Amino acid sequence: MNSWAHIVVTRSRWVLTIVLLVVLAAGVWGVGVFGKLSSAGYYVEGSEAMKVQQIVYDNFGSQSADIIALYTAPDGGTIDDIRSDVESTLARFDEQWPSESISTYWTAPPPMNQMLVSADRRSVAASIVLGTGSGATNANFSSVLDSLEVPGVDSQFAGNTVVSLEFTHTLERDLIKAEAVAIPVTLVLLVVIFGGVVAAAVPVFVGILAIFSSLATLRALSTVTEVSSYALNITSLIGLGLAIDYGLFIVSRYREELRSGSDPRSATVRTMLTAGRTVMFSAALLICAFAGMLVFPQAVLRSLGLGAMASVFSAAVLSLTAVPAVLAILGHRIDAWTWNREASARSEERAQRFWGGLVRKVVRRPVTISVVIIAGLLLVATPVLKAGFGEVEYTSLPSDSPARAATQKLVDDFPSTGNGATIVVQGEDGQVPSTDAVREVSREATAVAGISQTVTVGQQNDVVVLQALYEQGVDGTDRAGEITGELRAMTAPHGADVLVGGSRALVDDANAAVTDALPWMVAIMVVSTLILLFLAFGSVALPIKAVLMAGLSLAATFGVLTWVFQLGHGASWLDVTPSPMEPTFVVLILAVVFGLSTDYEVFLMSRMVEARAAGATTDQAVEFGIARTGRVVTAAALLLIVVTGAFTISGLSIMRFLGVGMIVALVIDATIVRMLLVPALVKLMGEANWWAPQWMKRVHEKVGLGH
């Protein structure tokens, strides 16, 4: 770090020029990622449900409708009145966009045709599976839907592709809206924090570079793996937020060094060796937290983990290259466009007096404060006991979304959506399963409570596919998951194998995989954090305390999220439909909050350890650390709240879940835990804070990372 600091100072213009050229070129190339994002990747390759899906596809082609067109007759009319218009429109559509299959009430065989007509016989559905040669793409899909409009007939469109593209387009619009709000608001806050425009502009400048870097990162990842459409928003905003936070820490330390009398070059070097080292270490902690996401088998989780890791890395690299280069160029001009330099210095002094006074009050009553805060956070965490995993559904779309309205009509007005368990009966040794075997499976499946009937979808080669249809009201309930388990428990008839899949089984298998892998993720995060914090601080107690505090923050955060988003308290204020939590975002929040919690611990404890190494007592070290970092840590949390809180203005309820989760976690961690609970516990632990066995001290002396 010392050598790099001197390179940046002596060749600052070269460093800045190279960084700008590389990042801008990468960002321009990265714009191409918008056409390469996927809405798939939620399910587990190799699971029983995925095997069923693959067998069905290999033998019968795609059975999942890309488009479900809903046509409703005018008031007083029936489907018979609109039949000719609908059928002629579908015929023209098939000529223009060649489809693999188009099924309607009038063409599908019974009993499947009954699923394509509404209970009042005013609406009819057309199930369309687009062929590989249809010519339909994401870019022209609106034209595809336009071709299905029937003049004079109310036409609505649902289906997997329709809903997926609506999610993707909403996310892309949300990203532009979020950045348009977050960047100017952040700049204004930084002007207030620093008391000047130039100092405030430096972190925002690096944050904008981080957005370009994020686009390039995702484009690169898309060439080797499936990248979720959610990764675009999450990676960009995490990169923006962290780059601004890191810039804040570095600029704050640089101005502190200037106020202490250092010349600009010395101040830059000293800043790199202190705040710069801490930023580097912070990035390592966050990368370890996100690395835990790589243990999950779902492509969407791995892509989010890789994207977040790359965002953290690029934010740190930009903060250790572009920021010090700009500081070395600006020198004392970092305080330019400041309305009152003395007022800025006095503001810092007032902040130190405030936080110093607060910590003195805390250490006078450490037991009371610790007990009250821990008990309060555990109480807030209690709704977690009722938490459950669900999936991203159409109800996550905005309430005015046409795709959501069409899907809701399909659920409400049609006697059956055709959902149920898909049962594959496969003969052994390539033989066709016997009629008796198929009949036996069908009879057992129909006997399961919650199944209305079992219909044969088709027979091809050595495979017979059955669909066990849910009774009205079963789909989307816990009973649907229980049905999958009961069907899988059926004894396979002689000479045949039985596999059970379907849409609910796909979700349940994916959620089970998340549950199984979650302990491994937690183990990776905890062990790597304990090791890194020991190497940083040379203490046994401080890393353990940091992990426990992160766990407490997480428990309270998920308690609030469960209370609002699953149990529905206040859900109407956020315009969300209460439902079980989607595991992808649970895992993401777990990684982000754990990483940020230990991140803020590093910034706080590094100044305490710095004071301790200079000979301060534990009480003096606590006061020094809080007084010097209280303002900057809470400011960093506030800035990150603004950036990630932009998720709350998303049209998707699942993104609002992420935004609210980040706001709650940052408020709890950066104020209650970090500024009150941590100093109280450090006071109670006394000299034990700095203890380590002699052999571990020797290890730290040899390979420790320093402060």
Image (cartoon, grey):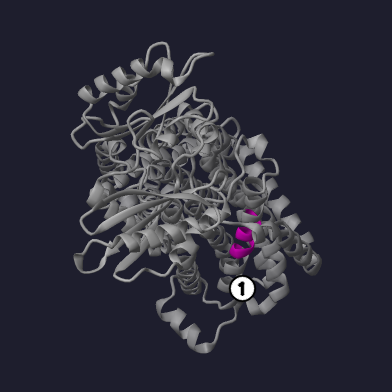
Q: Amino acid at mark 1?
A: Gly
Q: Secondary structure at mark 1?
A: loop
Q: Residue furthest top?
A: 152
For residue 496: magenta? no
- Membership of 552 in magenta stretch: yes
Q: Residue at x 20, y 65 (%)?
A: 430
Visible residue check, residue 701? yes
Vertical placement of residue 243 versus 609, above or below: above
Q: Is residue 9 above or below residue 45?
A: above
User: Along the line of sight, which residue is nearer the eye, 347 or 631?
Assistant: 631
Circle 1: is it few (<14), some (14-19), or many (20+) Cα within 10 Å?
Answer: few
- Relative to 523, is 667 on the left or the right? right
Whether residue 667 can be seen here:
no
Frontmost residue, 516 versus 172: 516
Instruction: Provide residue 695's location: percent of width, then percent of height.
Output: 48, 88
Q: Residue tagged by mark 1?
A: 615
- Figure label count: 1
Q: Position of residue 237 (x, y in %)?
A: 45, 42
Residue at x 48% of width, y 55% of height: 446
Q: Looking at the picture, tell me which residue is in the foreground, 67 or 235.
A: 67
Q: Position of residue 207 (x, y in %)?
A: 42, 41
Say which residue appears at 40% left-offset and 61% top-offset.
441
**Dividing the picture into quarters, in which one does residue 629 lie?**
bottom right
**Residue in front for this viewpoint, 550 or 692:** 550
44 with respect to 605 (left or right) = left
Quarter of the figure with the N terminus: bottom left
Magenta range: 550-557
In this rendering, position of residue 377 left or right of residue 590: right
Q: Is residue 673 left or right of residue 320?
A: right
Residue 48 placement (x, y as % from top left): 36, 62
Most frequent secondary structure within the magenta stretch: helix
